[in-house]
Image: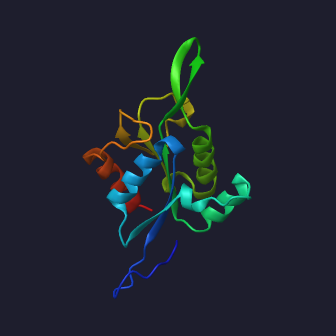
Amino acid sequence: MTVVAVGPGKKLATTIFIGSSSAARSQARAVIRKFASPALRFLPWWDAFTAGRTLLEDLDHIRARVDGALLLFSPESTTRIRNKKYGVPNLNVLFEFAYFYGHFGRKKVAMLKYGEFYLPTDLGGYIHISGSRSFRRGAAVQVGKRTTRELERWVSQL
């Protein structure tokens, strides 16, 4: 756990990596604004990655600095699967989810879903936090009550 003194009572702060696509950065920022506090800190991907390092080098460095990972999934592009058109999430975000899941395990990694998109059924048993059925590239929808409840419940068990 990342230990951070946050006041006279010396409470511990939990630090969570938050990943998203570039198109969902505004939504990730809205999530950070809603939940960040002295007891809960976020390390967003745009502050965490270093030019000149490989993705795996960066992820190895990041995982040592955080207590868990929240990956914001949203439709990034479209594809055809069995002759049906689907939106699919950013593949780097999917890779980061798998990387952190392999390191932290099931309880410390969550998928926050915004928009409608295809996910393989094999990803059905992981922690999903409902964001919104709607998603606007480069913009943010309001963080709703259900999202708040689910994310707070997930954070409480970290």
Quick one: which residue is furthest to the left in this view? Answer: 145
Q: Position of residue 79 (x, y in %)?
A: 58, 22
- Residue 149 makes an appearance in the image: yes
Q: Position of residue 100 (x, y in %)?
A: 60, 53
Quick one: which residue is furthest to the top in this view? Answer: 83
Q: Is the residue 140 above or below the residue 42 in the image?
A: above
Residue shown at the point (54%, 65%) measured from the top left: 66
Report the side of 49 relative to 69 (left or right). Answer: right
Residue shown at the point (62%, 43%) measured from the top left: 92
Question: On the image, which quarter does residue 56 sit in?
Answer: bottom right
Q: Is the residue 124 above or below the residue 54 in the image?
A: above
Q: Position of residue 83 (x, y in %)?
A: 57, 11
Quick one: which residue is furthest to the bottom in this view? Answer: 8
All told, the count of numbered labels is 0
Residue shown at the point (37%, 73%) measured from the top left: 38
Q: Is the residue 145 above or below the residue 64 in the image?
A: above
Q: Is the residue 27 above or below the residue 17 in the image?
A: above
Residue shown at the point (47%, 78%) measured from the top left: 4
- The C terminus, quarter of image: bottom left
- Residue 21 makes an appearance in the image: no
Taking depth in this image into account, of 76 and 73 the one nearest to the observer is 76
Report the side of 136 relative to 61 (left or right). Answer: left
Colour mode of the rendering: rainbow
Q: Position of residue 94 (x, y in %)?
A: 59, 41
Question: On the image, which quarter does residue 60 sit in?
Answer: bottom right
Report the side of 27 relative to 56 (left or right). Answer: left
Report the side of 76 relative to 114 (left or right). Answer: right
